[in-house]
Amino acid sequence: MNSARFPRATLSALGCVFLLLGRPVLAATVELAVDATQTIGDIDLTRYALGQGGLSDKPMIGPHTDQIAELQPQTIRLFGQEYFDLYPKRGRYHWGTLDKSIEAVLATGAKPLLCLCFKPHSLFPKIDQDIVHPNDYLEWEKLIFELFRHCNQRRRYGIEYWEVSNEPDIGEDGGCPYRFKPEDYFTYYRHTASAILRADPEAKVGGPALAGYRSRLGDALIEHCGKGDAPLHFFSWHIYSNDPRQFRGSIEEVKGKLGKYPRLAATETILDEWNMSLGNPVLTAAFQPAFVLETTRGFYEEGLTRSAYYHIRDVFVDRSKYSLWMSGKGVDFMAHWWNIMPQYDGLWDNQGRVRPAYYAFRLLALIKGQKLQVSGTTVEVKALAARNGGWCHVVFWNFPSSGKNEAAEVAVRFPRREHGEFRLMKLNADLPVNNLEVIRHGDVSELELRPIETRLEPYGVGWIEVGP
């Protein structure tokens, strides 16, 4: 905006439309009111958790066990990929390598959501993503049955969710060695689900972990299962987009499709790969953590059952291991994508450095316990609050909508007086360390005369705790 276009008197009448250094003045202050004395039910956002890409036979998340545990994820999605070599020869099983990755998940306090996406050479002797049926379905079912028995009956890992395939609508481009047509997928799904449920009728079986949630493959699965041809305990899909509204829209559409069939009334919805656009990422450091908060709020309000942020840690791939079960073209794609292209997916990069998005999940883990009402939110400024024990936590953020890129002045008030101390903290994504900064602290009694006020830049994130 050019100040030369307006006479000085007009600017004065508008209450000074410009700040120092030529930055526009903010609109009226956003007043957030948190009633910490009244609760409106329970809330627990830790069900919107994490996943790890299928990139290595090593326990990829192992170096960060303690840090992941602080996020309190209920589940971590794990690929049961061919590099684990689960079935090296007919009648011979090999579980040890997979066990290490499962145990790394369990060490964080989470339960694995196991995605079955492997093609043993003895059952799929030719490397071809379009060959999707094993040469012996009885043997395949026995393999799946024994895998379940090993994990949940012998090792007692307690894996509840068993997902049949990963991105079967796009094949090797999704990092897995099969590309299904709708009817072929349902045949494969039915055999695999049957084996799991023979091992334990209480297990949850689902899929198809679609790359595109509008894929005809998913529609066909819903139609078959809706007619009673097979159980569908959960339906799963993936989205990568910079617009949180697209995630909400996908949940609404999937629920609408499931809602056409009474048999699927209890089917859970799981968005188990999601992040900002990987082809067109927003590289503003503050964007990703605010995006995590805004998108997760949408998950909660739309009633999504679970999610898995993709992913925990970026990892290089070993071409030699992928070449054993993926075509040359597929190996080239995977190696170029993960080893050459810059990555922005993980909470940790492939050098082990933490990204600011990690701290967004730290804050989400605090929204657990009794939900508190927050009034005064706007289209851009949102908030979530909860009381857990003696502590009250308020997380609020500024996520610009419709192309706006404006800062917001935010005041947070507690209409009914709390007791104890408070701290105001902000997430500074530009800092190499100490991303959570303490801005102000003191006794709650001072808030009556001097409320908490702060400026949130676009994608700014604030956190207030009140407690003993």
Image: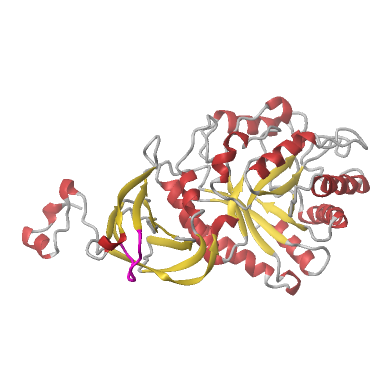
Which quadrant holds residue 205?
Answer: bottom right
Image location (x, y in percent) of residue 25: 21, 56
Residue 182: x percent and y percent? 76, 55
Q: Kindly tell me whether residue 351 is visible in this rendering.
A: yes
Q: Which residues, given as a range, are shown in magenta?
A: 412-420
Quadrant hosting residue 31: bottom left
* Residue at x 75%, y 38% (from the top left corner): 99
Query: How is colour applied across the structure in the image?
Result: secondary structure
Residue 283 magenta:
no
Residue sticking out furthest to the left = 9
Evaluate whether residue 213 shows in this view: no
x and y percentages locating residue 286 in the rendered image:
39, 45
Residue at 47% over, 43% down: 281
What secondary structure is the stretch in magenta mostly built from? loop
Q: Nearer the viewer, residue 393 or 137?
A: 393
187 with respect to 437 (left or right)? right
Q: Which of 165 and 352 is in front in this view?
A: 352
Image quadrant where residue 451 sits: bottom left
* Residue 253 screen position, x and y as percent: 60, 65
Q: Viewed as shown, does residue 428 lie left or right of 368?
A: left
Above or below, 337 against 36 in this view is above
Find out whether residue 414 is within the magenta segment.
Answer: yes
- 255, above or below 336, in the image: below
Total marks in image: 0
440 to 34, vertically: above or below? above
Q: Nearer the viewer, residue 49 or 467?
A: 467
The quarter in which the C terminus is drawn is: bottom left
